Image (tube, helix red, strand yellow):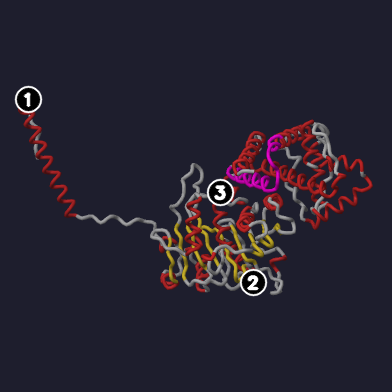
């Protein structure tokens, strides 16, 4: 499927969403739309595996017969169902009963027969509870099929669901539905919903262009990026993963087999479920990722709380776009926490450095961390200055990248990317000031491929360019009291041209002479016409 067709599928689905959501806001409708798309993927994947498992016994139906072939097999082989489902749990790690498959649900919606609402509820519960190793637990927990936003009465809600599912089924009928295609459509929809969500979008979405920068940086060799990409990353972590698109972007950089295990954490339950769906939709097996619902600042994930050095999680890459200047509640216990003890606690008013230190703690010696933060972390004083100073003295800050304003749906402020390493080859800091390299848009500014390419190229080969990038020694940074304000080191201001007063004066004298000459000539014409002459200076 071409990129154009993928975009067409995404646009088709977005147009359906836009038409059907009515008075419901984009955030609410998003959860229904994306869950149904996910059910379509799970069903296709399950039916494909069932066909392979059953081989010649898998029923072949006439084109006019819209029944699910698996439903026919269940009717004919009641005594073999238990063994078949046991095999399916082993192979695809979940079970969907025939009446809950997308083809059955879509046909129910088309005919508007029976109680679709109840059937869907039962199907979601069954998938969640019959999953293998609990990877599907609570996956549909935020989908409220009894919400009055779908309709005041049960019948109205049922009719609305029939309409939504029928339209989705029609919309995607002519498109391929393999995992890459549906995954791309899912990503497209997340982006479109984010655009309509305003400030709330920051909770779950990192713009693709920024995601590309971070993922390209962390997949380059950490010691010497100029040698190119790593062949493999064993573990990657995003502790504020939103819908998981940043983690998937890292995976895309290295290919499906380029990452051993993906780790993500997300505090918002709806977004956490989106992330798990997004992983599966992109063909990431449930054994290849672990997404945890919890608070990173409190470090309530037992996996990350492991004190045994032999079992402690160390990752090859950390990527993150945490909430900007998030207010938190630091306390004495957190002051003794292994993540913060050596650096001190970030202030109550802004948890930016708390997020940074959390992720940095789990970075391996040969790893790279790239994190998006507000510019304040570069120059604010107090506790933040102390943390920043120690990170610099320990030679952990590798690169500071300043980006243009208004790149996010959720905020117009300009942001920066900090690149950190535990073991750094270079003893200077590379500053890249990309704040003026963008395409202006109506709602958001946009980084074009050439802007992204220039940032990556400058980072990879540690290039210097006037008014764009410069390598700054630690001595110079120390003289500036460890202030990392980008414009101190790389100013984009162009110098005023030097004015030669003698040349300017000569020009003015010549202009004056020409005025007198022209006036005299004009007065000669006026005299011939017997008209009053013009006054002269």
In the rendered image of this protein, does residue 119 appear above or below residue 370? above
On screen, residue 93 versus residue 452, left or right, reads right
On screen, residue 389 versus residue 319, left or right, reads left
In the rendered image of this protein, does residue 215 appear above or below residue 101? below
Query: Could you tell me which secondary element the residue under label 1 belongs to?
Result: loop
Q: Quadrant of residue 104?
A: top right
Give me the disc on residue 338: 2
Residue matched to label 1: 529
Instruction: Magenta stretch: give its range.
Output: 170-195
Residue 324 visible in the displayed image? yes
Residue 225: horizontal and vertical position, in percent?
53, 65
Quarter occupied by the C terminus: top left
Mark 1 or 2 closer to N-term? 2
Q: For the point 63% across and 46% down, which residue is it?
A: 190
Give me the disc on residue 410: 3
The answer to whether mark 3 and mark 2 are in CB contact below 8 A is no
Pointer 1 local density, CA inside 10 Å: few below 14, some 14–19, many at least 20: few
Residue 405: horizontal and vertical position, in percent?
48, 51
Q: Quadrant of residue 467?
A: bottom left
Most foreground residue, 400 or 40: 40
């Amino acid at each position: 499927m071409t990129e154009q067709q993928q975009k067409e599928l995404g646009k088709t689905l977005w147009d359906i969403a836009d038409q059907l959501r009515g008075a419901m806001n984009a955030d609410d409708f998003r959860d229904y739309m994306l869950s149904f798309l996910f059910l379509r993927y799970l069903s296709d994947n399950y039916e494909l595996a069932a066909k392979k498992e059953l081989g010649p016994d898998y029923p072949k139906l006439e084109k006019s017969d819209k029944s699910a072939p698996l439903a026919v097999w269940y009717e004919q082989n009641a005594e073999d169902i238990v063994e078949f489902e046991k095999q399916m749990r082993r192979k695809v790690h979940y079970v969907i009963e025939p009446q809950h498959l997308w083809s059955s649900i879509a046909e129910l919606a088309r005919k508007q027969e029976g109680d679709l609402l109840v059937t869907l509820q039962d199907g979601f519960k069954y998938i969640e509870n019959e999953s293998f190793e609990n990877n599907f637990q609570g996956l549909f927990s935020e989908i409220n099929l009894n919400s009055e936003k779908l309709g005041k009465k049960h019948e109205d809600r049922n009719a609305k669901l029939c309409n939504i599912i029928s339209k989705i089924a029609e919309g995607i009928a002519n498109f391929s539905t393999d995992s890459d295609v549906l995954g791309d459509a899912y990503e497209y929809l997340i982006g479109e919903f984010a655009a309509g969500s305003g400030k709330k979008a920051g909770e779950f979405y990192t713009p693709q262009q920024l995601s590309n920068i971070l993922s390209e940086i962390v997949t380059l060799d950490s010691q010497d990026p100029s040698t190119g990409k790593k062949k493999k990353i064993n573990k990657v972590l995003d502790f504020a993963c939103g819908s998981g698109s940043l983690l998937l972007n890292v995976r895309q950089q290295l290919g499906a087999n380029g990452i051993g295990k993906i780790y993500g954490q997300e505090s918002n339950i709806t977004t956490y479920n989106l992330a798990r769906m997004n992983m599966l939709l992109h063909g990431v097996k449930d054994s290849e990722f672990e997404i945890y619902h919890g608070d990173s600042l409190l470090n309530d994930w037992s996996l990350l709380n492991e004190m045994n050095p032999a079992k402690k999680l160390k990752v090859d890459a950390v990527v993150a776009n945490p909430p900007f200047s998030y207010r938190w509640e630091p306390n004495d216990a957190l002051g003794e926490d292994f993540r913060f003890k050596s650096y001190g606690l970030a202030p109550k008013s802004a948890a930016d450095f708390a997020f940074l230190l959390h992720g940095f703690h789990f970075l391996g010696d040969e790893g790279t961390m790239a994190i998006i933060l507000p510019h304040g972390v570069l120059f604010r004083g107090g506790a933040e200055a102390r943390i920043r100073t120690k990170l610099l003295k320990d030679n952990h800050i590798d690169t500071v990248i300043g980006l243009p304003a208004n790149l996010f749906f959720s905020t117009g402020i300009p942001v920066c990317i900090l690149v950190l390493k535990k073991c750094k080859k270079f003893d200077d800091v590379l500053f890249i000031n990309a704040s003026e390299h963008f395409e202006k848009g109506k709602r958001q500014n946009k980084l074009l491929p050439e802007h992204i390419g220039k940032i990556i190229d400058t980072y990879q080969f540690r290039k210097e360019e006037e008014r764009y990038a410069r390598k700054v020694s630690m001595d110079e940074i120390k003289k500036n009291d460890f202030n990392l304000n980008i414009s101190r080191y790389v100013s984009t201001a162009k110098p005023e041209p030097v004015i030669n007063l003698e040349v300017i004066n000569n020009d003015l004298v010549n202009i004056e002479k020409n005025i007198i000459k022209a006036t005299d000539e004009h007065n000669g014409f006026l005299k011939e016409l017997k008209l009053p002459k013009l006054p002269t200076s």
